[in-house]
């Protein structure tokens, strides 16, 4: 005999989970029955024997079905659509009885404020920064530091903030906020400050739309004419 | 020590050594010193505001030799007034913005030389000579309060030197030089409305003197 074939009721489909990883098993559904083929004819595994089989057949190479111990065929294997047992029975993750709930993400919002604060930084372009530094008084440059990103944007920090086209930011608890804006509600600022207090020289730069960037202190360079002139982006 | 080594040590380490006797510089040494000075000009230009004046090699060479000899005269006290007049020769070219900046490459170290000369008598011929020279090169003497500039026009007529000179007198916190009629508006412009932050004493001083 070539193989063993078992037939189960569709209601017992979950019982096939115990043999799902057996190699070479094929499954076909027909009516309210499930047919499983590809089982070795001499298989006696306990997992197989525990299956709630309605019928068990042995099939030969001509796909004739024999009842166990009988020498004459009982039937012919019908044409069915066979597929691998692994794709016929997909895996589902178990569900916890009392699963924890994910906290919903809080979207940080900024809104205009009537509170005033001194500007501390300006986000501008390398071109504007170089043009400013070319003739800026040294006493002003010496109080500034800057960081440049690959796109050519420059964040300049220090006071007095240089007058040039760009976005101006105020500083509070290592958080740079767009000038004229505050967190909505303002208490969020304190929460963020507490959350980010691990690195004292790191700045969090928030944009008006609530997006933010983390800027480590080590990327800033003390402003000097040569440092600015020799800065290029590629 | 050669002139080249003197310049190199001065620029890179801020310390100098000079030969124990006044002897002419070797032509090869002078040529190599010129290369060092031009390189220093190129490097220093990146820290100057705007477009620096073109390079004046004669002025740069004169200033380097002058400083070298001046150090020698401070170190070798047996040399007399005649030697000073023979070797501390004034610049014979035009004190143009280019000459001012090229000479400044080494003359900017003159404040250190004046510190060395403090031990000399006020009437010492060397001190007199240095003071005469210093008054003619105000761009390099911005940090010496005692030096009163003769003529600021070569500086103030050049945009780069003008900004750099104002930077220097602010940096030196020299109220007298900052109150110079030609400099005061430029200093006020540099400080803008932030004088109280950048230089509080300047704002107070103006209140007193106006």
Image (cartoon, coloured by chain):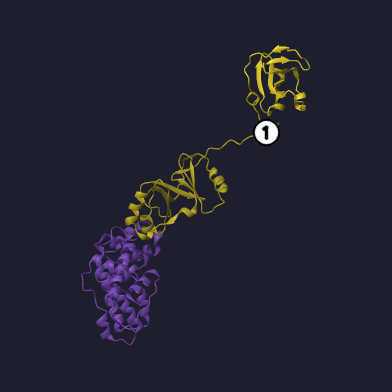
Chain colours: A yellow, B purple
Between B131 and A29, the one nearer to me in the picture: A29
Vertical position of residue B191 compared to residue A70: above or below: below
How far from the left and from the top, in percent, is residue B132? 27, 77
**In x, y percent, where is residue B156?**
25, 63
Report the residue that reaches farthest toward the right: A69
| Chain for numbered disc 1 | A
Q: How many marks?
A: 1
- Closest to the observer, B189 or A83: A83
Q: Is residue A49 visible?
A: yes
**Residue drawn 24% across the image and 78% down it:** B89
Image quadrant in which you'd find residue A137: bottom left
Q: Which residue is mark 1?
A: A99
Rendered position, B11 above or below B125:
above
**Coordinates of residue A83 in the picture (x, y in percent):** 62, 22
Residue B110, image x, y percentages: 33, 73
Tell which of A222 and B201 is nearer to you.
A222
Q: Secondary structure at mark 1?
A: loop
- On the question of residue B141 being in view, the answer is no
Name the side, left or right, on which A206 lies relative to A127.
Answer: right
Q: Split into 4 quadrants, where in the image is the N terminus of chain B?
A: bottom left
Say if A176 sits above or below B32 in the image.
Answer: above
The quadrant the C terminus of chain B occupies is bottom left
Q: Which quadrant of the structure image shows residue B102? A: bottom left
Q: Quadrant of residue B121?
A: bottom left
Residue at the image point whose x is 33% and y is 81% from the top: B72
């Amino acid at each position: 005999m070539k193989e063993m074939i078992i037939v189960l009721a569709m209601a017992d489909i979950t019982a096939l989970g115990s043999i799902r990883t057996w190699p070479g098993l094929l499954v076909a559904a027909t009516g309210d029955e499930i047919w499983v083929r590809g089982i070795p004819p001499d298989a006696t595994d306990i997992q197989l024997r525990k299956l709630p089989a309605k019928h068990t057949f042995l099939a030969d190479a001509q796909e004739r079905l024999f009842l166990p111990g009988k020498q004459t065929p009982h039937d012919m294997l019908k044409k069915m659509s066979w597929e691998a047992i692994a794709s016929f029975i997909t895996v589902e993750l178990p569900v916890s009885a009392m699963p924890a709930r994910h906290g919903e993400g809080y979207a940080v919002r900024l809104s205009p404020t009537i509170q005033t604060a001194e500007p501390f930084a300006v986000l501008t372009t390398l071109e504007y920064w170089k043009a400013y530094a070319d003739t800026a008084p040294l006493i002003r440059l010496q109080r500034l530091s800057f960081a440049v990103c690959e796109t050519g944007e420059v964040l300049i920090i220090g006071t007095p903030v240089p007058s040039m086209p760009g976005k101006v930011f105020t500083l509070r608890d290592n958080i740079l906020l767009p000038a004229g804006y505050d967190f909505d509600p303002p208490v969020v600022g304190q929460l963020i400050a507490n959350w980010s207090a691990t690195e004292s020289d790191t700045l969090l730069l928030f944009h008006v739309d609530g997006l933010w960037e983390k800027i480590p202190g080590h990327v800033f360079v003390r402003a000097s004419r040569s440092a600015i002139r020799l800065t290029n982006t590629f | 020590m050669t002139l080249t080594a003197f310049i190199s040590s001065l620029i890179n380490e801020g310390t100098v050594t000079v030969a124990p006797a006044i002897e002419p510089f070797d032509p090869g040494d002078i040529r190599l010193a010129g290369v060092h000075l031009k390189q220093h000009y190129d490097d220093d230009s990146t820290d100057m505001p705007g477009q620096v004046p073109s390079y004046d090699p004669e002025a740069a060479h004169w200033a380097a030799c002058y400083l070298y000899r001046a150090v020698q005269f401070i170190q070798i006290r047996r040399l007399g007034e005649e030697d000073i007049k023979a070797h501390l020769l004034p610049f014979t070219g035009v004190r143009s913005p280019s000459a001012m900046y090229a000479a400044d490459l080494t003359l900017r170290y003159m404040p250190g030389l004046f510190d060395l000369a403090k031990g000399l008598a006020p009437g010492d011929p060397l001190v007199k000579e240095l003071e005469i020279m210093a008054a003619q090169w105000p761009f390099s003497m911005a940090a010496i309060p005692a030096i009163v500039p003769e003529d600021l026009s070569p500086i103030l007529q050049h945009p780069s030197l003008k900004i750099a000179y104002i930077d220097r007198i602010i940096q030196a916190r020299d109220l007298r030089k900052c109150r110079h009629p030609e400099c005061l508006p430029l200093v006020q412009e540099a400080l803008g409305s932030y004088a109280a932050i950048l230089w509080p004493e300047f704002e107070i001083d103006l209140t007193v003197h106006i």
